Amino acid sequence: MGTHLVLFRDVQGHAVALEDRCRHRNIPLSQGKVINGKIECPYHGWCYHADGNIAEIPANAHLSERVYPVGISSFHCVEQDDYVWVCLSNQPANPKPVPFPNYAESGWVSFHMKTRFNASVDACLENFLDCPHATYVHRGWFRSPTKKKVEATVRTLEDGAEVEYFEEPRVKSAVWSLLSSKKASMKHTDRFIAPATSTVDYVFSNNVHYKITSSCTPIEKNITEVYTVVTFKVKWFSHLVRLYFQPLSKLIIRQDVNILQAQADNVKKFSGEQFSVIETDVLYKLIKQWRLAMHSNHEPPIAGEERKIEISL
Ligand code: FES
Ligand SMILES: [Fe+2]
C-alpha cells in the first residue's frame, strides 16, 4: 500500500511497526540495529522507541528527550497464526485479521507460501475462487475437463460470500488421485471473506480435509503479495503428504501467477479491461460489490441470499 515499514520487537517481544524513515536525514531504519527493544539509525545513531518517539540523539546526549524533534509514525500490530498484521490507520483494526482456519491445531499439518502476483487484489481473489479455470490452467494437476454438470449453491454472508459445489468430477487429477479415496464423497466450498481473503475448503466423507487460505496484500494497484496457508488433515503419513503437496502447490500457484500476468499484459496492451461476466463466474460480482462498498463506505451485498446454479466442470 505504498507505506514502507520497519518491523522489530520491543523489550517485551511484541512486534512493532514504524515508518521506515529516520526523522533526521531519512535513512531507512530497516538498515539499522535493534538495541534493547529500540531501533537505531545507521547514519548518526538516532534511536527510536517502539511508539516512534525519539529515545536518543547521541550528538545531543547532553539535552533532555523532551526537546527532541517529534518522532515517526507507529502502526498497530497484531500477531496471529505466526504472521504480523499491521494496520495502517492510526486506530487498531476492528475486527481482527481473518484467522487461517485450523492453523497449528493438533491433527492438522500446515505450510506457508508467499507469492507475488502482477495483478490487482480483485483479480487474485477471483482467480483463487474460480472453479472453471482449474480445468484449463491446472489441467491434469487439479482437474481435467469432463463437462460434468455440477450443482452449486451461492450464498451471501455477513462477511463475504461463498459457493458450495456438490460432487464435482475428480478424474485425471494428480492432486486428488493421490490425496483422496475415490469412494469418499467430497464437498467443496469457496469463500470470499472481505476485504481480501479467500478460502478453498475440501471435506471428504472419510474425515480428510484440505483448506487453502490466501490473504492478499496490495503492494501497488496491480501488484499483490499473497500469503497462503495450506492446512490439511489426513489419516496417516501427513508429513509425507506435505512433502508431495508443498512443491505441487507451488507449481499450481505459479500457473496462476502466469495466467494473471498474461491478463495484466493484455489489459495494458488494450488500455483497459473489457470483461464479459456470465452466471458461472460465480463470485466475481459479489467480490467486486463488496470491495467497492468497502472503498466507498457503502453498504455491502445483503447477507442471507441464496441461489442455485448449474456449472459444467
Ligand atoms: S539520518 Fe538517521 S540519524 Fe541521521
Ligand atoms: Fe488457480
Image (tube, grey):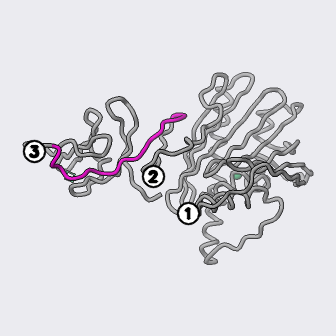
Q: Which residue is mark 3?
A: 63
Q: Which residue is mark 2?
A: 89
Please say if the residues under marks 1 and 3 sit with CB atoms less than 8 Å apart: no
* Chain-order first, disc 1 or disc 3: 3
Which residue corresponds to the image point at 77% horizontal and 29% vertical from the top-left?
208
Give the SS element for disc 3: loop
User: Disc 2 marks which amino acid?
Assistant: Ser
Which residue corresponds to the image point at 45% horizontal and 48% vertical from the top-left?
91
Name the quadrant containing residue 178. top right
The image shows residue 184, relative to residue 97, as above or below, that is: above
Q: State the image coordinates of residue 184 (x, y, percent, origin top left).
A: 87, 31
The answer to whether the residue bearing label 2 lies less than 8 angstroms from the nearest atom of ligand 1 is: no
Residue 1 lies in the magenta-colored region: no
Name the quadrant containing residue 246. top right
Give the SS element for disc 1: loop
Task: Specify start and end residues of the magenta stretch as a single range.
Answer: 65-82
